Amino acid sequence: MTNKADNFVNCIHNENYEDEYLSKKITSDSMIYDGGRDKELLNGWWNFGIDQYDTCLRAKWYEEKYQDEEGRYNPIDFSFDDWEKIYVPSCWNMHQEKLFLYEGSIVYTRTFKYFNKGEERVFIKFGAANYDAKVFLNKEYLGYHKGGSTPFYVEVTSCLKEINRIIVVVNNTRKRTNVPCENTDWFNYGGLYRDVELIRLPGTFIKDFTITLMPGSNFSKIQAGVTVDGPVTEGTARLRINRLNVDCEISISNGKGSAFIDTSPELWSPENPVLYDVSLSYGKDVIHENIGFREIKVVGTDIYLNGKKIFLKGICTHEESVVNGKAVTEEEIRENFKLAKEMNCNYMRLAHYPHTEKAARLADEMGIMLWEEIPVYWAIDFNNEETYRDAENQLTELIKRDRNRASVIIWSVGNENADTEPRLKFMSSLVKKAKELDSTRLVSAACMLDHVNHIINDRLAEYLDIIGANQYYGWYQTDFNNLIKLFDNSKPGKPVVISEFGADAKSRQRGTVDEKGTEDCQLDIFKKQVDVLGRIPYVKGTSPWILYDFRCPRRLHFTQNYYNTKGLLSADKKYRKPAFYVMQEFYASK
């Protein structure tokens, strides 16, 4: 071991400064069930400082050591309350032009008041922080969360005061070992871009709650699971669904309980998105939720919703808007679902990472089935054990967050990964984890096809319920006739959803069908695609790429101008390209 020099200064010489922070992880184990609970928003104007050199972490600004041991004032490099302000939730890229392409750390801070309302436990929930976040409260380090699109929770009960300073160091640097890694096909937003909420709970509270229609019960049985946290781990929970005349006691032993209830709910579907008011109580804790009940399964090459064969009439979408970046509003989500319904869609693929939980709740209400996925995207570091733990944790956080949402029918474990041995081990393990966490939904992945031999032969397909297939025949695979060869060569034995197809088109840019980047070329490719796809018996759904144009630093052609222009709508969603109507007509015929 090398001895430190006498003049070693930790904040400037220690290049392993981050290690002490990374050892205290905030993972899915810290999640609490917060649906149907009262929350206090910590949104609003926060102070922020661009900290390109991570000096807050290196020099431990959060300790706020304004004076030395003898009372003399220290020189300091921060003044939290004098910093400029940024609104939370938002993406810092949209705040100032100088931050548009910024990658690195930004320090967020604010103060808030807290008055104890009796015997309670208090948590702070962060809806998402891209990509990682280190959280401090009142000079105490609370932990580190990794993963830019899933929520995380920290208990703050023991460190709260009347006036509290919270500091969050958010870093969006792309890294080889991250999920996703440094090379993607979308814009790298940064910041606290979803709600920050304070949650007050009793000393013993409901930590987790699952409720669903029991598969294979002929739609006549509901299963529920409860986990409680706190000193009272033995007792009775009570589940009520008044419209179904359900009033059921659930015995809790060692903090856990389950129940199977005979009842026949009206089934949720896109045509009939019926939701039931469900309440669950344990001790002083009560949850109220709106829950839909439905069954999704695969038999052979068919997909069944509530016992009836369905075709997934879909569209992909990114979580983005021109004005708000990744911090989309409820109104923008509703707009996206309405546009999908205008296209006659019954399903949407939320690509390529977990979208806000508001999306699934609104889909429950509006009647849209969802494919949700984690960003195991392209060339992930499949040999890295820490990368796998990151991916599994993001998958777990997503599933625990949304497994009571009837709209969510598919968990996807990744997108367009080369079929190698390390990748097969990595992603098949994720499939097994998804099924362990939730046996009531289908698991898929958006697989790359073999464009040399023109066949569906990804080895991961053996583990999947539905084979997602991305193909761009007529566009990247320029000979469209090879798509017909691919389907003739393939005998998957499972349903295939064409999870992507499409072509770029600059809005209102016209030309010949041979001129790529024009609406006419895109229109021609879509016409050819639906003509073929509609005739393949094992293709049981499509979700073309993509609903509207979105920002992407990879796209430097003059017709793109740093946007992926494969949208069927313009980026502002005000203009429908001609291919939009091709899909509208195709789905009407299905």
Image: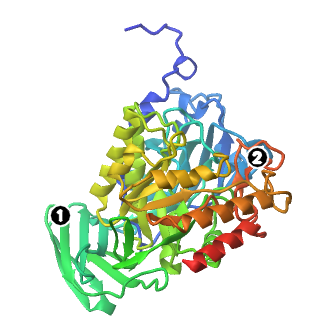
Q: Residues within 10 Å of mark 1 (few under 14, many from 20)?
A: some
Out of 128 and 392, give the one closest to the viewer.
392
Name the residue rendered at 56%, 55% in the picture: 484
In the drawing, does residue 107 fall left or right of residue 553?
left
Check whether the beta carbons of the residues at disc 1 and disc 2 lie within 8 A of each other: no
> In the figure, 54 relative to 431: above or below?
above
Q: Residues within 10 Å of mark 2 (few under 14, many from 20)?
A: some
Which element is circle 1 on? loop
| Residue 238, position as x, y percentages in the image | 23, 79
Task: Give the labeled residue for mark 2.
Answer: 562
Closer to the camera in the image, 213 or 511 = 511
Depth check, front residue: 169 or 11: 169
What scheme was used to colour the molecule? Answer: rainbow
**What amino acid type is highlighted by mark number 2?**
Tyr
First in sequence, mark 1 or 2: give its number: 1
Which residue is denoted by mark 1 in the rendering? Answer: 233
| Nearer mark to the viewer, of 1 and 2 | 2
**Amino acid type, callout 1:** Thr
